[in-house]
Amino acid sequence: MSMTMTEKILASHAGAASVKPGEIIDCRVDFVFANDITAPLAIQEFQKMGVEAVFDPDRVAFVLDHYVPNKDIASANQAKITREFVRARGLPHFYDIGRAGIAHVLLAEEGFVGPGDVFVGADSHTCNHGALGAFATGVGSSDLAAAMALGRFWLRVPETVRYIFTGRPRPWVTGKDLVLSIIGTIGVDGARYGAMEFAGDTLEHLTMDERFSITNMAIEAGAKNGIMEPDERTLAWITPRARRPFTVVRPDPDAAYADVRTIDAARLDPVVAAPSSPGNVVPVREAAGVRVDQCFIGTCTNGRIEDLRVAAKVLAGHTVHRDTRLLVIPATPAIYLQALEEGLIKVFLDAGAAVSTSTCGPCIGGHMGVLAEGEVCVSTSSRNFVGRMGHRTSQVYLANAAVAAATAVTGVLTHPADVAGELVPA
Amino acid sequence: MTIRGRAHVVGHHVDTDVIIPARYLVTVEPGELAKHAFEDLDSALRDRIGHGDILLAGENFGQGSSREHAPIALKGLGLAAVVAVSFARIFYRNAFNIGLPVLECRDAHARVRDGDLVEVDFGEGTVRNVTREESYAGQPIPEFMQRLVDAGGLVGYVRTQIGKS
């Protein structure tokens, strides 16, 4: 039977010749992880299950990334639960500050997930890893505890919608703009319970970093997973990193899709998701001029080296506007180091930006850049719900890193071309 | 299983950030989390909700983060069930796993008003509005999930699976 990529991966992990949408399956998982917010609950449930050991210590990771460095006593106590659990069991893949980064970026960098894998994480943006051609989905703590105990996970096989991007994106248009454009069209529940399979010649023009930001935001359309077929660029990226052999899975040419949609990427201009929904998408040109108090470049969506490069390109020779703050948070220590070696950190500091150690902090209004009453932020993150980054009256515009950088220079929402010209960002 | 209680109506696309803002995710205690439930949506809502009440939500309830703290906060608030036009998938699983009964029902949200007395029959998948003498058909719990309930929830299910191996 013909299958989509998602169906093929799930079938192989369920030990079935084929699966079809709607079917409930019990499948093997290749890797699981939890973060400092979701792990304490997962550990509590795991212990209730009466299980002593995780299914395979080599396939379990814990990453402290949200409230790190711990912001207060309560968050420190939560982190301590995970630290002690890991130490007591001698689990090898534990990432604490200094070596930790934002989990989705870090775990990909570390090669824990490869093409064809099933990856379950107690964090909604686990779908990020679909850019590698893996089935990756976010779950809650109890489900994670069960997967950690059994090495298996039950789920309903999702219907797949195939999104085909065509054409070469214009200057300053990134993967972020592509995925926001889709969410703006289908809505925040447009892919609810489904699989989003991204394809098309446009992907050839996108770096792996940009591809990750697309699959990362599949959850913002309500999807179970986002996925892309591996190409030469994917294999060049994952091969030196992969810790286990992997299997490249491709969709059957006659696979049954719930829908196929085509997006002309060559016609897109940079966009923002205006407050307070990731589905409230408008071109930057239409929203331009809004006064902005803070710009934030970072997160699992857009805190990668390409994001920092494009931001530095915009900022070079400019300074952050006196009424605006710019916060730059490289997603992992490796990205931080790379940015340092490339001179990007100097560009940020010279421009008057604050550069911080890896953390999810500001994205969730947790710490390190919380918004005051009525403040406006342009953020490269993925969610702009009411109160997401601070006070309930604060407002968040989601954008790519070039837009955030350009806005930091002018103090009002700005198209990058207006600061840095029409140069094609290399 | 049938649950009867007073209804509280909220809108569409209520996200987990407004159910329990991330800044409070420094505890797993239901009572502590409940103190901040819906704080950014309607700061008085949590005070209006009494023990055994039922939340009536629109489409895509619980969208966003995977935080299991969201259904835990609602349970801590005393809510006995959530009925929604539709649920975001992670929230649905989480609610089920922590023992907060949830039911999908297309028509109830548009008809039920704050304070109506409603009765939710999870086996039948129906919502009866006692105040207005109306009934709305919803989706019964999927068969597979009912088997999980019968096994004693996820914890019981895992214990059974481990016993098998």
Image (cartoon, coloured by chain):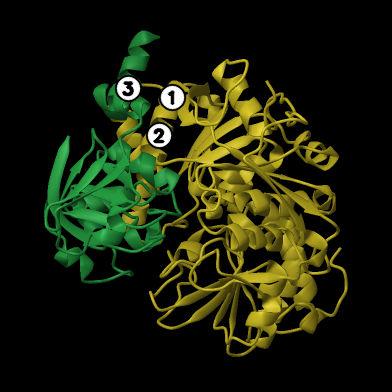
Q: Position of residue A132 (x, y in %)?
A: 70, 39
Q: How many marks?
A: 3
Three-letter amino acid code of the residue under disc 3: Tyr
The residue under label 3 is: B157
Q: Colour of chain B?
A: green
Q: Colour of chain A?
A: yellow
Q: Give the residue displayed 61% in from the left and 41% down from the top.
A: A107
Three-letter amino acid code of the residue under disc 1: Val
Rendered image: mark on residue A54: 1
Residue B28 appears in the figure: no
Q: CA distance from mark 1 to mark 2?
A: 14 Å
Q: Position of residue A226 (x, y in %)?
A: 62, 44
- Image quadrant where residue B16 sits: bottom left
Q: Position of residue A144 (x, y in %)?
A: 43, 34
Q: Give the residue displayed 55% in from the left and 26% down from the top.
A: A58
Subunit under mark 3: B
Q: CA distance from mark 2 to mark 3?
A: 11 Å
Check contact, mark 2 vs mark 3: CB within 8 A.
Answer: no
